[in-house]
Image (cartoon, helix red, strand yellow):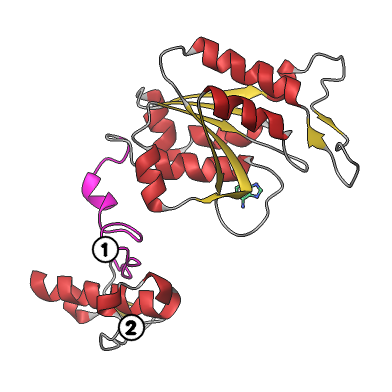
Amino acid sequence: MRIDVVTIFPGYFDSLELSLLGKAKSRGLLDVRVHDLRDFARDKHRTVDDTPAGGGAGMVMKPEPWGEALDGILTDTPDTQPLIIFPSPAGEVFTQPMARELAQEQHLVFGCGRYEGIDQRVFDEYAERGRVKLVSIGDYVLNGGEVASIAMIEAIGRLIPGVVGNPESLVEESHEEDGLLEYPSYTKPAVWREREVPPVLLGGNHAAIAQWRREASIERTRRVRPELLPRELDDAPRGRHAAD
Ligand code: ADE
């Protein structure tokens, strides 16, 4: 997958060199290119913002540098028909199903806004010429789209075949398969500070382990995120598990 990012803070994206995504990049599974929006400003101060039309607080990102940056990417990749994502608290909420959908794309472009946002004509221009999506990573406000883009790139990137070594580890996770939260995990030692690993997990009975995990998932989901619980599990008996 090819990913282009346009930002005034390219340094944020250095973190993509780390861990699994860094490895995916070096193995050619992910081709990430980060562009500094200021390189597309035309004045000597490399200005990318201006006062809002109609007045008011804050600054708005000027359309011209965005136009130059995005035109450059589109010209450079004439065959990929990228989806352009603008992270925004005003966008559609990012979810695991959306991550799965976006992991099928050949080319994504992330446009990171700052200040009070980007001039609306940028969205209108590229929505008319291709595909544009405003996406929020949750109901809170960040200072810009960089952190939101990194979160989305990680969630999408790990779903690209080959990025996560053992694909089975993608299945039994929160928000995957049945939409329940993941069950608690334990490792050795069997007792730590007088706290035991639940004995069923050490007994080798795979059916009993599967049943314990499912009940733990249901109990956790009911307690922490009741709105995610499938209707048919609404009245299931409550299990007892360690606090999370
Ligand atoms: N930019 C600022 N806040 C954001 C959020 N919650 N999600 C995506 N982009 C943002």
Residue, x 16% and y 70% (percent of image)? 210
Badge 2: how crowded within 10 Å, few (<14), some, or many (20+)?
some
Identify the residue position indicated by label 1 in the image. Answer: 178
Identify the secondary structure beneath mark 2. Answer: loop
Disc 1 from disc 2: Cα separation: 20 Å
Magenta highlight on residue 166: yes
Of the image marks 1 and 2, the number of the one nearer the N terminus: 1
x and y, in percent, of residue 31 in the image:
44, 23
Residue, x 60% and y 60% (percent of image)? 139
Q: Nearer the viewer, residue 94 or 218?
A: 94
x and y, in percent, of residue 44 in the image:
87, 14
Vertically, is 237 above or below 203? below
Residue 154 visible in the snapshot: yes
Badge 1: how crowded within 10 Å, few (<14), some, or many (20+)?
few
Q: Horizontal placement of 187 versus 199: left or right?
A: right
Q: Nearer the viewer, mark 1 or mark 2?
A: 1
Give residue 182's quadrant in the image. Answer: bottom left
Report the span colored magenta. Answer: 163-187
x and y, in percent, of residue 242 in the image:
37, 82
Identify the residue position indicated by label 2 in the image. Answer: 241
Residue, x 39% and y 31% (percent of image)? 23
